[in-house]
Image (cartoon, helix red, strand yellow):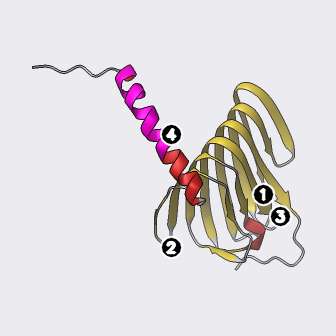
């Protein structure tokens, strides 16, 4: 006996389950989140809801990978104590807006992309429909830390901006 399963079968049965999961995550308010990681690599997946990092002082000691389905994402690295070395920050998002604030005291290599929407990287902006891609970098002589930021969204916007900090130090 051979059973054939088509994409239509999966979509027909999968959408109701996805909608129930999204509805439950909205009711709970924090979304469905999966967190794995160590001090070197932090990985999170989030279904629905807004995420914010950096409202309070925090420590960046390794890499960060974030996947979100629907919602806005804010990462403020100006409030982070950034350990020396190279740190990768990878963000992939379905629908929403991503804002990453980077202190002007560290070297940064940033890449952003959107299928429908706008991307702004270190002062340069592009927008439209189709895959929009932008890469920029800013080198800081004497910086002990380098940030490699790669952010993409299917529908929405990505903003990666440098923020002047007068009293921020990289430890």
Q: Which residue is mark 2?
A: 39
Q: Pointer 4: what residue?
A: 19
The residue labelled by disc 1 is 139
**Which stretch is magenta?**
8-20
Sort mark 4 into few (<14), some (14-19) or many (20+) by Cα contacts within 10 Å.
few
For residue 30, above or below residue 97: below
Mark carried by residue 104: 3
Q: CA distance from mark 1 to mark 2?
A: 26 Å
Give x and y (percent) for residue 105. 80, 68
Label 1: few (<14), some (14–19) or many (≥20) C-alpha neighbours in 10 Å: few
Mark 3 vs 1, N-terminal side: 3
In space, the residues marked 1 and 4 are separated at their CA atoms by: 45 Å
Q: Is residue 18 magenta?
A: yes
Residue 128 falls within the magenta-colored stretch: no
Tag 3 secondary structure: loop
Where residue 113 sits, quadrant-wise, is top right
- Check whether the beta carbons of the residues at disc 4 and disc 2 lie within 8 A of each other: no
What is the tally of numbered marks visible in this picture? 4
* Mark earlier in primary sequence (1, 4): 4
């Amino acid at each position: 006996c051979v059973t054939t399963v088509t994409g239509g079968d999966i979509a027909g049965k999968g959408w109701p389950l996805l909608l129930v999961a999204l509805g439950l995550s909205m009711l709970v308010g924090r979304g469905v989140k999966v967190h794995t990681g160590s001090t070197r690599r932090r990985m999170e997946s989030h279904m629905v809801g807004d995420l914010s990092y950096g409202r309070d002082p925090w420590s960046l000691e390794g890499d960060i990978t974030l996947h979100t389905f629907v919602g806005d994402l804010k990462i403020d690295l100006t409030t982070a104590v950034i350990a020396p070395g190279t740190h990768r920050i990878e963000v992939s998002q379905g629908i929403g807006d991503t804002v990453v604030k980077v202190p002007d005291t560290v070297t940064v290599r940033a890449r952003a992309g959107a299928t429908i929407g706008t991307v702004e990287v270190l002062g340069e902006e592009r927008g439209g429909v189709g895959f929009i891609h932008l890469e920029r970098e800013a080198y800081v002589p004497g910086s002990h830390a380098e940030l490699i930021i790669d952010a993409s969204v299917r529908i929405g916007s990505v903003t990666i901006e440098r923020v002047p900090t007068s009293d921020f130090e990289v430890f």
